[in-house]
Image (cartoon, rainbow, N blue to C red):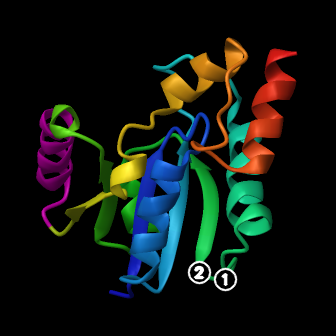
Amino acid sequence: MSRVAIYPGTFDPITFGHIDVIKKSLRLFEKIIVAVSDGENKKYLFDVYERIEIVQKALYSDLKLNQKKIKVISFNSLTTDLCKKYNSNIILRGLRAVSDFEYEFQLAGMNRKLNNNIETLFLMSDVENQIISSKFVKEIVKLGGDIKKFTTKSTIKSLKKKYE
């Protein structure tokens, strides 16, 4: 298999924690598929098309990351099916704290049962970004707080516009 990894998530919105995982994975893989979930089991602030645009602006415009190495897509299928579609046997997941581990461990196990050729690789963001969550970023901006330390300029602009 080629060295393609799938990084699934809601990215509602993307944060520096997510970006750390993407940057670290670029050192390990030829291509990263950032897969924005369009699942119906969550209530999102941004719809899937907005989230894709926000991720693209953050990665390509704000951070100038290589568009040839990162593809941003939406999906509403099993992540294992997405792996098959993109000829990947790696699912990337970010870990912030021990509290994330139990859920991520179960998810990795289920994905492994669905397709035993797929491995889940856990990456941690840098220490200063481990406390960041999309949920807290949304709450801070909603209450008028400064989120410059948590996400990119274009993402901040999108969040502020949403809450105007």
Residue 21 on image: x %, y %: 41, 61
Nearer-the-camera pick, 106 or 123: 123
Please say if the residues under marks 2 and 1 sit with CB atoms less than 8 Å apart. Answer: yes
Q: Does the magenta stretch include residue 75?
A: no
Q: Is mark 1 on a helix, strand or loop?
A: loop
Nearer-the-camera pick, 137 or 60: 137
Which mark is drawn over residue 36?
Answer: none
Q: Quadrant of the C terminus?
A: top right
Q: Can residue 97 be seen in this view?
A: yes
Placement of 80 over or under 48, stated as above or below? below
Q: Please give the residue where the numbered disc 2 appears in the rendered image.
A: 69
- Magenta stretch? 101-116
Q: Is mark 2 on a helix, strand or loop?
A: loop
How many labels, in total? Answer: 2
Residue type at numbered disc 2 = Lys
Q: Is residue 80 visible?
A: no
Q: Which residue is drawn at 19% across and 59% down?
A: 115
